[in-house]
Image (spheres, grey):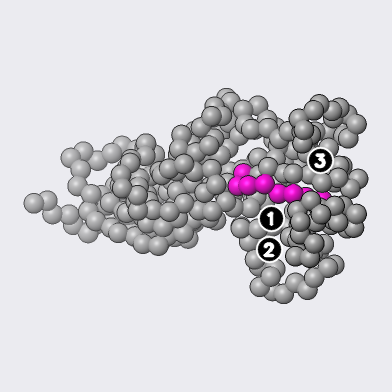
Amino acid sequence: MNTVFADEPHGECIRVRGLVQGVGFRPTVWRLAQELALTGEILNDSEGVLIRIWGEAEDLKRFLPSLLESLPPLARIDKLECSDWVVGKPPDSFRIIASERGAIHTGVLPDAASCDDCVRETLDPFNRRYRYPFTNCTHCGPRFSILRKIPYDRANTSMAQFPLCEDCRSEYENPDDRRFHAQPTACHVCGPKARLRRQDGSPFSLDRFTSLDDIDAAANLLRTGEIVLIKGIGGFHLACDAANASAVNRLRERKGRPHKPLALMARDIEVIARYAEVGELDRRALLSKRSLKKY
């Protein structure tokens, strides 16, 4: 039997259970391991995340407290299980390795609202994702609605049919990038596209409605009182201008919904406050990761 003294270099195996897949957890651990000069490996599996780590005793003591203080925004740890990791030869680096399969005992996050960084990129005319509606990273974007099976890898999602372009792959494979293993990541070049179509499929000239793109054309149609059917990631939405009584009445007639309230969408808290009382709990929910935030 090997005896490990408290002040000697040794290895630990850490099982992490909770919502830790698809949230940037592995690159966070990778970066922390670099900072503490620890070696080993980390992987996703059917039970969550498994960390095998080796290093000086004092550095290992700092590892878990530091990890808990630097968790990604969407991560949630429910349980940690630690044991000794006995290896013949200590690893010389820390690696993120391929996922392992097995009986499923872990969960996946629901879709999350766009983070500040992704919104900033989408609105920046000099960014390559300018006006790209599906911009996301490990801190935000679709999760559960695109998943086919666990572990949460791109090949197991509906994004598998969209091969990454060179720029997106460079981000996806870089542990220092916030899009490292962001499974839904994409851009104008390689990702899904937003398209505006007539209900009957007949062609029309986009130039009549916009000088930008299909999304701007749809917005202009809403402004003129039209009803637009929006196919989203998790379903369909019928939309019209809520301030246009004629458009709302036509929508109610077509849906056969003369009295039941319709859901309202608003740009931000300030707009909502014009029409409703917004309490502190309401504000927190509306600005949470499960909301549309303030944009």
Please tell me which residue is depicted at 8% across the width and 51% down the height of the picture: 1
Q: Image quadrant of residue 271?
A: bottom right
The stretch drawn in magenta includes residue 278: no
- Can the viewer see residue 27? no
Q: Is residue 187 left or right of residue 256?
A: left
Whether residue 201 is situated above or below residue 21 in the rendered picture: above
Viewer-proximal residue among 72 and 133 = 133
* Tag 1–tag 2 contact (CB < 8 Å): yes
Which amino acid, by three-letter code, is at mark 1?
Leu
Q: Which stretch appears magenta?
A: 233-240
Give the mark, 1 or 3, whose residue is nearer the N terminus. Answer: 3
Please tell me which residue is depicted at 28% across the width and 58% down the height of the picture: 82
Which amino acid, by three-letter code, is at mark 2?
Leu
Residue of label 3: 218
Q: Is residue 27 left or right of residue 194?
A: left
- Circle 2 sits in a helix, a strand or a loop, which is it? helix
Residue of label 2: 286
Please tell me which residue is depicted at 69% across the width and 74% down the height of the picture: 280
Give the mark, 1 or 2, whose residue is nearer the N terminus. Answer: 2
Please tell me which residue is depicted at 89% across the width and 48% down the height of the picture: 225
| Percent of width and height locating residue 128 | 70, 32
- Circle 1 sits in a helix, a strand or a loop, which is it? loop
Task: Please identify, in this view, whether the residue under mark 2 or under mark 3 is nearer the observer.
Answer: 3
Viewer-proximal residue among 253 and 60 = 253
Viewer-proximal residue among 71 and 151 = 151
Residue of label 1: 292
